[in-house]
Amino acid sequence: MKITATKIPDLLIIEPKVFRDERGFFMESFNQACFNESVGKEILFVQDNHSKSSKGVLRGMHYQLEPAAQGKLVRCTSGAVFDVAVDIRPQSNNYGEWVGLILSEENNLQFWIPEGFAHGFLVLTETAEFMYKTTNYYNPLYERGFAWNDSHVDIDWPEVENIVLSDKDKLQPLFDTK
Ligand SMILES: Cc1cn([C@H]2C[C@H](O)[C@@H](COP(=O)(O)OP(=O)(O)O[C@H]3O[C@@H](C)C(=O)[C@@H](O)[C@H]3O)O2)c(=O)[nH]c1=O
């Protein structure tokens, strides 16, 4: 497992070791001890999520407020997505900054997005399946978001012909610039 810090040091890119042979491949998609060592603290995941989306679907930008805030360990198991985390920690020097990367069935990358970040992704292939672990349960009362194309955050999304949003995401407010 190879860990790479991003320009926002709490956001980590995790590359599992993939064992390939004539049958296909094997990898440990999650190992509690290795993960905790990489993050430098004990993280407890309580929910696993799986979504499938077609090309152009953009889910985001989403987060939950305290006390329901969620850390997310995300990956794409089929197809490819452009995945983005935005720093929404008011005291952070990186407040409002984003990190984006391609997660795909080919690169097997995982992205660790701790509490204090908003998250979203755009599907780049005909379909994509997206799987993630969360450190807190889904709680719609604490669910918040902001517009994927907010001009202050200015995420550099890859070009995709038709962006498809949920009704909820069409109505997301602008990013709170403090
Ligand atoms: C996220 C979630 C949704 N749901 C339900 C609510 C709703 O009826 C249906 C679809 O929900 P949504 O439209 O919110 O799904 P989606 O837009 O995929 O929401 C997800 O987006 C990505 C980017 C994230 O980071 C996630 O944390 C989550 O916010 O599934 C659950 O039951 N549990 C969950 O954990």
Image (cartoon, grey):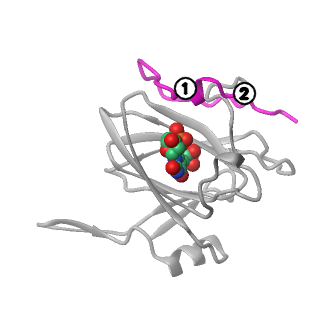
Which class describes the residues within 10 Å of circle 2: few (<14), some (14-19), or many (20+)?
few
Q: Is mark 2 within 8 Å of ligand 1?
A: no
Q: Nearer the viewer, residue 165 or 3?
A: 165
Q: Position of residue 116 (x, y in %)?
A: 73, 53
Q: Which residue is tagged 2? A: 173
- Residue 167's tag is 1
Gap between marks 1 and 2, in whole Å? Answer: 13 Å
Q: How far across and down, in percent of the image, does residue 93 sit?
A: 83, 48
Instruction: Give me the residue at 63% from left, 59% from top.
Output: 71
Q: Amino acid at mark 2?
A: Pro
Q: Residues within 10 Å of mark 1 (few under 14, many from 20)?
A: few
**In this orientation, which residue lies closer to the viewer: 155 or 45?**
45
Contact check, label 1 and label 2, Cβ < 8 Å = no
Residue 43, numbered circle: none
Instruction: Give me the residue at 59% from left, 29% from top.
Output: 169
Residue 43 occupies quadrant: bottom right
Taking the spot 62% from the left edge, 70% from the top edge, the residue there is 39
Q: In which quadrant of the rendered image does the N terminus lie?
A: bottom left
Residues rendered magenta in the picture: 152-178
Vertical relation: 90 (above or below) 177:
below
